[in-house]
Each structure stands twice: as C-alpha cells, then as structure tokens.
C-alpha cells in the first residue's frame, strides 16, 4: 500500500511538473510570437513596410494587399513590392488578440492597423489586420497576413507576373480539416445566405472587423454585419494548420454580388479553431479587394 501510495504521489507530482512545464513553454512561445510581431511592426514604422515584411514572412508566406491578387512566395513578393509605391508609407499595427496552438507550431494575431504617409498629409487611416504565424524551431515567421479597411494604401501596379486568380485546393494535409470547414461554410452561404452561414460557423468567441477597425463580437453580431441582399461565393486557395489540429487558417478568393450592382471581387484570410466538442469554427475573418479574374 505504501509503495503504491508513494508511486501515486510521485506520478502526481511528475504530472504536475509536466503540465507546468508545458504551460511555461507555451507562455514562452506566446511571448516569442508577440515579440516577433512587435519587432516587425516597429521595423515597418522605422524602415518601411517592404523591409519589414520581407524580413518576417515565410518563404511560402502569403500577403493579401488591398487591390492586389494574393501574393504567395518570396519571389512573387519581391516583384510585387518592387512595383508598389510605398516609400513614404508608414504602416504599423497593434494586436488586440493572440491565439496559440496546443503544440505552439502555429499562432495567430489580429488587431488594429494604422497607415499614414508622413507630415502634411491627411489624418492616419485606421483599419485592421489578421496574421497567421508559423514556428520553425525558435523562429516565428508570417504564413499569411491581410490588411483590411485601409483604402488609401498605394494601389499595386499589375503587370501579369503575379497570377490574378488561383485554383481551389483540396482538403489535404494539416490544413485539410480547415479547408473542409471553409468549403462547407461557403456552401451554406450560397444556399442560405451569408448571415445564416456566418452566424452558424462563427465560434462563440469570434470577432470580425468592420469599417475603421470596429469590432463585431459573437455569432449573432457577426451574422448581422453581413445581413444584406447579395450572393456570396468563395473557395480556399491555400491553407495551413497546426500538427495538434486545434488551430488553422485558409486563404481564399470570393465574389459578392449584390442586386443591381457590379460584383465585388475579394480575397480573405480566415482563422479556424477546433472547439472542445471537436467542431471547427472560425475565430476571425477578414479580407480586401482583388482584381477580377480574366
């Protein structure tokens, strides 16, 4: 009995130590992620957005810039930035939320973005951003990032080098469950309308950004924010997920066709979380305009 009791106490202490160690490791990675984001935002403010994004994005990372196609990969990113007149642009951001996967391989941040063009210019413009980050060893890098609500950002010079449209992807790999969720979300929006779909697929703690960075919190508020007559169509073109399966992201292309109006072509970044009951729901979602497909 004493031997078994001593074993039980020892096992209990070991379990507590392992749990505490996991929590400390997760907290360390959360701090490291926020430090990486803070350093990127400060570099953008001090040395320009181009230097900041090139230095922080993953080699396969995706930039969703207003008015441009989804820019994926280091070579396309450099070509895109070379044609973007952003020398005088000051673009920075501040996180309002952060989420980390259980295995700390993926993290997401979202918050307020501010763009200005220096002195003697109109007041700074306030919008929002969402970023998905991946960890490789000790380094955090941007897997995908979107800026929204910043209409005065410089317009891209499109010369045909970057694809204006991408094919839908299949539900495979670590991002597969989140792609499947995105496709089901899109089907419900097409069949029953955006308000129903957004309310159904939003996590209880979900947030989305409206104009000037205003927040909608919770499924009902998010559903009301998109409750207007229109036909919504979208499909995911890229995705990623944590090996632990509890956090992921999708990037996609959308078309919103309101009655008696020209279709609005856009692209989006959606962050997904797996609930305690196993259901996948979106945690936040944002997008901006893109050129129409040829």
Image: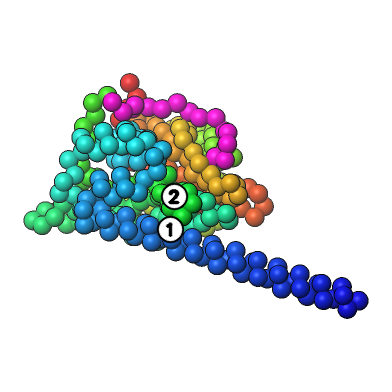
Looking at the image, residue 7 sits to the left or right of residue 274; the answer is: right
Residue 84, image x and y in percent?
Answer: 21, 38
Q: Are marks 1 and 2 in contact (CB under 8 Å)?
A: yes
Question: For this rendering, which residue is in front, 91 or 265?
Answer: 91
Question: Magenta: predominant secondary structure element?
Answer: loop
* Residue placed furthest toward the right: 1
Q: Quadrant of the N terminus?
A: bottom right
Question: Circle 2 — which element?
Answer: strand
* Residue placed furthest toward the left: 120
Q: Is residue 108 magenta?
A: no
Disc marking residue 33: 1
| Number of other residues with Cα within 10 Å of mark 2, as a class: few under 14, some 14 to 19, many 20 or more | many
Q: Residue at x 33, y 21 (%)?
A: 294
Disc marking residue 284: none
Residue bounds of the magenta highlight: 161-175
Residue 176, image x and y in percent?
Answer: 57, 37
Cα gap from disc 1 to disc 2, whole angstroms: 8 Å
Residue highlighted by disc 2: 133
Looking at the image, residue 156 sits to the left or right of residue 146; the answer is: left
Q: Residue at x 31, y 48 (%)?
A: 55
Question: Circle 1 — which element?
Answer: helix
Q: Residue at x 43, y 52 (%)?
A: 140
Question: For this rendering, which residue is in front, 2 or 19?
Answer: 2
Above or below residue 217? Residue 17 is: below
């Amino acid at each position: 009995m004493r031997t078994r009791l001593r074993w039980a106490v020892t096992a209990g202490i070991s379990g507590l130590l392992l749990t505490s160690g996991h929590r400390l490791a997760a907290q360390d990675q959360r701090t490291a992620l926020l430090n990486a984001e803070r350093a990127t935002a400060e570099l953008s403010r001090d040395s320009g957005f181009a230097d900041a994004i090139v230095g922080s994005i993953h080699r396969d990372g995706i930039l969703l810039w207003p008015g441009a196609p989804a820019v994926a990969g280091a070579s396309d990113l450099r070509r895109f930035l070379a044609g973007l007149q952003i020398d005088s642009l000051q673009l920075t951001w501040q996180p309002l939320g952060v989420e980390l996967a259980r295995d700390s391989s993926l993290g997401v941040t979202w918050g307020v973005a501010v763009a200005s063009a220096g002195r003697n210019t109109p007041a700074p413009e306030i919008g929002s951003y969402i970023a998905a980050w991946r960890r490789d060893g000790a380094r955090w890098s941007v897997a995908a990032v979107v800026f929204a609500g910043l209409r005065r950002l410089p317009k891209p010079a499109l010369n045909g080098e970057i694809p204006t449209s991408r094919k839908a992807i299949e539900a495979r790999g670590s991002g597969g469950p989140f792609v499947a969720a995105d496709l089901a979300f899109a089907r419900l929006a097409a069949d029953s309308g955006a308000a129903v779909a957004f309310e159904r697929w939003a996590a209880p703690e979900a947030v989305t950004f409206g104009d000037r960075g205003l927040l909608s919190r919770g499924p009902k508020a998010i559903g009301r924010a998109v409750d207007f007559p229109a036909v919504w169509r979208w499909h995911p073109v890229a995705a990623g997920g944590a090996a632990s399966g509890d956090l992921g992201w999708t990037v996609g292309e959308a078309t919103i066709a309101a009655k008696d109006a020209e279709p609005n072509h856009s692209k989006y970044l959606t962050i997904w979380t797996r609930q305690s009951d196993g259901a996948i729901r979106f945690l936040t979602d944002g997008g901006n305009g893109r050129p129409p497909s040829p």
